[in-house]
Image (cartoon, rainbow, N blue to C red):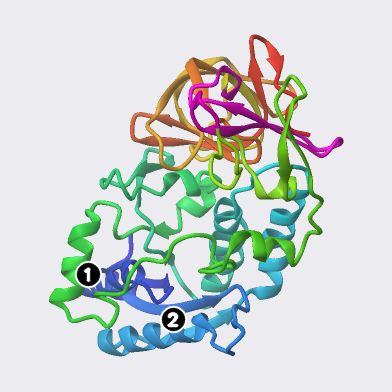
Amino acid sequence: MKDPKDTRVVVGMSGGVDSSVAALLLKEQGYDVVGIFMKNWDDTDENGVCTATEDYDDVIRVCNQLDIPYYAVNFEKQYWDKVFTYFLDEYKKGRTPNPDVMCNKEIKFKAFMDHAMSLGADYLATGHYAQVQHNGERYEMLRGVDDNKDQTYFLNQLSQDVLSKVMFPLGHIEKSRVREIAKEHDLATASKKDSTGICFIGERNFKEFLSQYLPAQPGNMETMDGEVKGKHDGLMYYTLGQRQGLGIGGPGGPWFVIGKDVKENILYVGEGYHNDLLYSDGLEASELNWATGVVPTETFTCTAKFRYRQKDSGVTVTPLEDGQVKVVFDEPERAVTPGQAVVFYDGDVCLGGGTIDQIVKNGEYLTYVG
């Protein structure tokens, strides 16, 4: 590896504390650091205020503090074509997409990485909580040491080529320490709150936002036995396991979404958190990426996550002929949701992941969605 002073690292800077500290640490290590702000979405609100402008102002302040050059680059068209269109298409199918995974795959570590390399960068760095280690001929992506902030779930689509050119300076640091570092250096973003939710929705009401792009079709809310319990506002507004916003109750406990029939426009609901109909014992997934660069050909066991904030679950994975995989759970899992990512792990190593297409119970597809 080249000497740090001869190694150019482009840092994707969001205007938040994580990417600010990532740039700071690399600068302290002697790298030739360049900060670049990505604008992926026109988020001007009804008052003409654009939060991206405020975020870029914060990037400028931090880069000036660190004495590093900065630029802004616009990927709005690529984001619309690759991420937002996918987001809408998945909702039309009655699924619940994960735009963060697609954004990392298509924008941050593809379009943005290509741009960084065109500027003569040796590496692209971000404020993600993950780690990369070189293991022989391969690169491995490891969980961040802060269990509460580990973001490998969202990075499951990264390839060996990307991992060979990426740096995650915060992967070995606890989030609380990142805040301390920012305050110790009086960074402009030291006390800025973390952004939450999907970037193009921001603080807005999700239902209101989605209705601007997809026409809502109200329909019946029914039990699996056909008893009508009320009306839903449009299937796209609901996800498996959801409790909020149903407006129904009963003596047996709260009600939850347990399925959808897109063709008949029916939202299925069931009573009780541990309703048997919310549980499955397997899934099928497609769009697989093996971050390790090793494509499995035989059945193997590992652990997996089916959503970001969950503990690992033991699974058995069987590759299928068409590049898909069949996954059998060690124990039944609640509210596994088509459209979301399933991500596989061997200890701290992220093996890769894919998109959940079907959920399975007792060897049969749960055809509630689609």
- Horizontal and vertical percent position of residue 186: 18, 81
Which residue appears farthest toward the left when viewing the image? 184
Name the residue carrying label 2. 55
Image height of 210 relative to 189, above or below: above
Question: Which secondary structure, mark 1?
Answer: loop
Identified by mark 1, the residue type is: Gln
Visible in this render: residue 327? Answer: no
Quadrant hosting residue 215? bottom right
Q: Is residue 234 magenta?
A: no
User: Which residue occupies the foreground of this view, 106 or 257?
Assistant: 257
Dividing the picture into quadrants, the one containing residue 110 is bottom right
Nearer the N terminus, badge 1 or badge 2?
1
The magenta-colored residue range is 250-278
Task: Mark 1 vs mark 2: give the one in front.
Answer: 2
| Marks 1 & 2, CB-CB < 8 Å contact | no
In percent of the image, x 48 and y 28: which residue is there? 253
The residue where tag 1 is placed is 29
Instruction: Give the position of the N terminus as an image quadrant.
Output: bottom left
**C-alpha span from label 1 to label 2:** 25 Å
Q: Is residue 358 left or right of residue 201?
A: right
Residue found 38% across the figure and 35% down from its top: 349
Instruction: Kindly tell me whether residue 203 is visible in this rendering.
Output: yes
